[in-house]
Amino acid sequence: MGLDEKRTALIFKAFCDENRIKILHLLKSGEKCACKLLEEMNITQPTLSHHMKILCDSGIVIGRKEGKWMHYSISSDGIDKALCYLEKLKNIGEER
């Protein structure tokens, strides 16, 4: 897998906000409904939606709809891709 700059930027944008980091910490224990995330965070529903869109677009988080609520969880595949990008960046000098 090469370093796709746009994909890399999307992945690391997910980690560039303290609210998104808090959401990831909350999701470490497993899938959570958006309503539970709202209870834990001191943000509005539109703000949560904004952060969840960024996290889902990055592939770090996946969502599934159940009734009127979205349920979110961390994507192992998304985390693996982020780690792979970091590993490639770490070894960038060795490629020259």
Image (tube, rainbow, N blue to C red):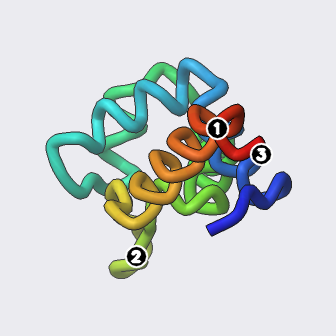
Mark in the foreground, 3 or 2? 3
From the top left corner, tell me how far across and down residue 63 is, in percent: 44, 68
Q: Helix or strand or loop: what does disc 3 sit on?
A: helix
- Quick check: 35 above or below 56? above
Quarter the N terminus occupies = bottom right
What is the number of the mark on residue 42? none
Quadrant position of residue 14:
top right
Spatial CA distance of label 1 from label 3 is: 22 Å
> Local crowd at mark 3 within 10 Å, few (<14), some, or many (≥20)?
few
From the top left corner, tell me how far across and down residue 42 is, in percent: 48, 20
Q: Helix or strand or loop: what does disc 2 sit on?
A: strand
Kind of residue sitting beneath label 2: Arg
Taking the view exactly as shown, the residue that stands out farthest to the right is: 6
Q: Are marks 2 and 1 in contact (CB under 8 Å)?
A: no
Mark in the foreground, 1 or 3? 1
Residue annotated with mark 1: 94
Q: Helix or strand or loop: what does disc 1 sit on?
A: helix
Residue annotated with mark 3: 9
For this rendering, which residue is in front, 29 or 38?
A: 29
Quadrant position of residue 22:
top left
From the top left corner, tell me how far across and down residue 32 is, in percent: 27, 53
Q: Earlier in the sequence, mark 2 or mark 1?
A: 2
Residue, x 55% and y 62% (percent of image)? 59
Spatial CA distance of label 3 from label 2 is: 24 Å
Residue, x 15% and y 42% (percent of image)? 29
From the top left corner, tell me how far across and down residue 24 is, in percent: 39, 37
Spatial CA distance of label 2 from label 1 is: 40 Å
Quarter the C terminus occupies = top right
Residue annotated with mark 2: 64
